[in-house]
Image (cartoon, grey):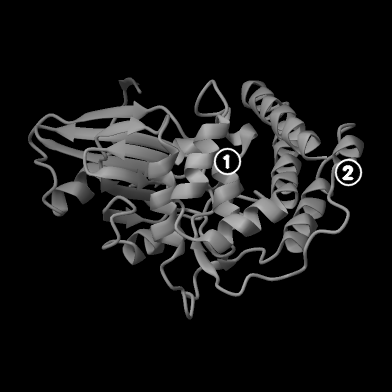
């Protein structure tokens, strides 16, 4: 979806003209794209040329306890994945700076993926994630952040998130915490996208692609699977939760039986951590963005219902 036309930054036009992506003498259309909960994303069009421009809100880049907003890491990730057919092709990037006494945000320019945001077909998602997770990360790139390697570590992370929340729902959530999460650490670590909800999958003309690589890490593939299958996260991208058939299609199509077995064994721990995060976001956004806070409240309710059904 698109919204009204926006004013184009002269510095952006200069950068893209230098790359010969645009003709500075011709008309440029700059349209805000809907989607994304933190950064602003635009479609820049001139004739047959279409590129995506992502402008980062880095005011909270280091404070989000689950999804840090790290522009420089997304640049490295897109470069690392440039031959993978998993992500869009990077065209240009620059850090936050002041140009002609005007501050420009950290910005990423990449190929525009003509298509639509994912709504169905869990088989395609499972196949894409299999390709990502089954690519060997040994040794992992040193710019990838370390992620939890066990259900026990996921629960510890959830505990840490709850320490940043002051809300009456905490007591109910603590009652749902798994009593004895597995301490067995994953041996085969994976390149993990880190923010793998349905809204970050684009069904493009070239096939399914995954966007928003600003918080990847090295860890357990179960983390991405949890994000995608989360009933709470699913509520942000479509009206209906995944059906049992859709979940089964995902499990059958994901090309690593050991990961699926581990997800099923440890599902309560990983989904409990997500519930902690939803409560954190609901509480912290209540005053600054009530509508989004309500969205996280709905996500929390769905995740709690899922956890209760496991008991």
Element at badge 1?
helix
> Which numbered dot is residue 293?
none
Q: Which residue is mark 2?
A: 174
Judge the density around disc 2: few (<14), some (14-19), many (≥20) Cα neighbours within 10 Å. Answer: some
In this orientation, does residue 181 appear? Answer: yes
Question: Residue at left 82%, top 41%?
Answer: 165
Q: Is residue 149 left or right of residue 202?
A: right
* Image quarter hosting the N terminus: top left
Whether 208 is drawn above or below 145: the answer is above
Question: Residue at left 47%, top 41%?
Answer: 249
Q: Which residue is mark 1?
A: 229
**Residue nearest the observer in this picture, 185 or 243:** 243
**Residue nearest the observer in this picture, 33 or 60:** 33
* Image quarter hosting the C terminus: top right
Residue 309, horizontal then vertical, whole percent: 77, 34
Element at badge 2?
helix
Q: Is residue 112 left or right of residue 18?
A: right
Which is more N-terminal, label 2 or label 1?
2
Quadrant in the rendering for residue 77: bottom left
Front tag of 1 and 2: 1
Q: How far apart are the alpha carbons under marks 1 and 2? A: 22 Å
Question: Residue at left 50%, top 29%?
Answer: 237
Q: Is residue 198 left or right of residue 229?
A: left
Judge the density around disc 1: few (<14), some (14-19), many (≥20) Cα neighbours within 10 Å. Answer: many
Whether 16 is drawn above or below 298: the answer is below
In this orientation, does residue 97 appear? Answer: no
Residue 42, horizontal then vertical, whole percent: 33, 34
**Residue nearest the observer in this picture, 36 or 15:** 36
Quadrant in the rendering for residue 155: bottom right
Residue 51, horizontal then vertical, whole percent: 23, 41
């Amino acid at each position: 979806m698109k919204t009204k036309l926006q004013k184009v930054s002269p510095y952006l036009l200069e950068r893209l003209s230098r790359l010969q992506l645009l003709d500075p003498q011709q008309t440029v259309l700059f349209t805000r794209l809907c989607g994304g909960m933190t950064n602003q994303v635009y479609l820049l069009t001139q004739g047959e040329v279409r590129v995506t421009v992502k402008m980062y809100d880095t005011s909270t880049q280091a404070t989000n306890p689950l999804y840090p907003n790290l522009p420089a890491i997304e640049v490295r990730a897109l470069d690392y994945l440039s031959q993978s057919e998993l992500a869009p092709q990077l065209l240009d990037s620059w850090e936050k700076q002041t140009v002609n006494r005007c501050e420009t945000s950290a910005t990423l320019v990449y190929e525009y993926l003509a298509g639509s945001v994912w709504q169905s077909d869990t088989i395609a998602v499972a196949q894409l994630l299999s390709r990502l997770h089954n690519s060997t990360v040994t040794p992992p790139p040193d710019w990838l952040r370390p992620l939890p390697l066990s259900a026990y570590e996921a629960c510890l992370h959830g505990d840490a998130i709850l320490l940043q929340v002051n809300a009456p729902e905490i007591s109910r959530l603590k009652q749902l915490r798994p009593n004895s999460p597995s301490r067995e650490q994953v041996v085969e670590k994976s390149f993990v996208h880190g923010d793998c909800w349905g809204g970050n999958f684009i069904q493009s003309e070239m096939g399914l692609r995954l966007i928003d690589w600003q918080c990847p890490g090295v860890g357990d593939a179960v983390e991405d699977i949890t994000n995608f299958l989360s009933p709470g996260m699913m509520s942000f991208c479509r009206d209906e939760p995944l059906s049992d058939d859709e979940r089964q299609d995902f499990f059958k199509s994901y090309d690593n039986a050991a990961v699926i077995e581990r997800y099923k064994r440890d599902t309560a721990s990983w989904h409990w951590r997500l519930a902690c995060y939803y409560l954190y976001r609901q509480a912290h956004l209540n005053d600054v963005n009530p509508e989004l806070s309500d969205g996280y409240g709905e996500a929390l309710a769905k995740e709690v219902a899922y956890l209760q059904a496991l008991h």
